[in-house]
Amino acid sequence: MLKIAAPLLGLLLALPVSAQTLQLKPANPQPSAGSLARGLAVIYAYPSKLRTIADAKKGLSKGKRGPALAGLSYLDGAEGEIALTSKAAMKVAASIKGYMKFDAPGTYQLEVISNDGVLLRVGGKQVAFNDGIHACESAGVTSVQVPSAGWYELEATYFQRKGTSCLLMDWNKGGGMEPVPDSAFAYKR
């Protein structure tokens, strides 16, 4: 019988669920190239109460479409800078939708970094969740299995309460973590 030392056992039991590889589902049907525009569609709301993803979702029920996001590479800026492509620097909720393209099947690691909260799903699976108010920080690294090359549905809820804002997505396609290029994102026109 294999014995594991108590400290090591505690560490193993504390591993996040994201340590498991999630099986993503490709969009079905795959969108045609002519039906897509580069970037991600976004709806914004500016609720006065904004401390959680639940608050953001509630505020977004009265949201309005904003300028598309180029991708998910919005670095932590200076306090007072506009959040994403919204009209405000603080108390911004965003519903983000579109597709993410994987050029080859395989196992990828995805990391989402946000200030403040984010809930992000790709291919029908939750790959990031970091609720509440916090500095620009990682929601953790999630391993995903991509069964085939192509487009995968992406949807996210994000909010920025006060201070600075960021929303970033990195991936590891076998060499090391790097930003997901803007060209990997699209939305239906």
Image (cartoon, rainbow, N blue to C red):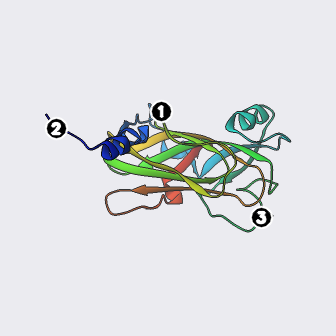
Depth-wise, is mark 2 or mark 3 nearer the camera?
2
* Residue 121, image x, y percentages: 52, 38
In the rendered view, tell whether residue 93 sits above or below residue 75. Answer: above
Q: Is residue 16 left or right of residue 80?
A: left
Which mark is first along the chain, 2 or 1? 2
Image mark for residue 2: 2
Q: Amino acid at mark 2?
A: Leu
Q: Secondary structure at mark 3?
A: loop
Depth-wise, is mark 1 or mark 3 nearer the camera?
3
State if disc 3 and disc 2 touch (CB < 8 Å). no
Q: Is residue 17 left or right of residue 183?
A: left
Q: Secondary structure at mark 2?
A: loop
Q: Is residue 1 left or right of residue 147?
A: left
How many C-alpha atoms fall within 10 Å of the one at disc 2: few (<14), some, or many (≥20)?
Answer: few
In the rendered view, tell whether residue 78 sits above or below residue 167. Answer: below
Image mark for residue 16: none
The residue tagged 1 is 124
The residue tagged 3 is 81
* Residue 115, image x, y percentages: 66, 54
Q: Is residue 71 visible?
A: no
Residue found at x 78% / y 41%: 50
Real-space Cα distance between discs 1 and 2? 37 Å
Which mark is first along the chain, 3 or 1? 3
Quadrant for the C terminus in the image: top right
Real-space Cα distance between discs 1 and 3? 32 Å
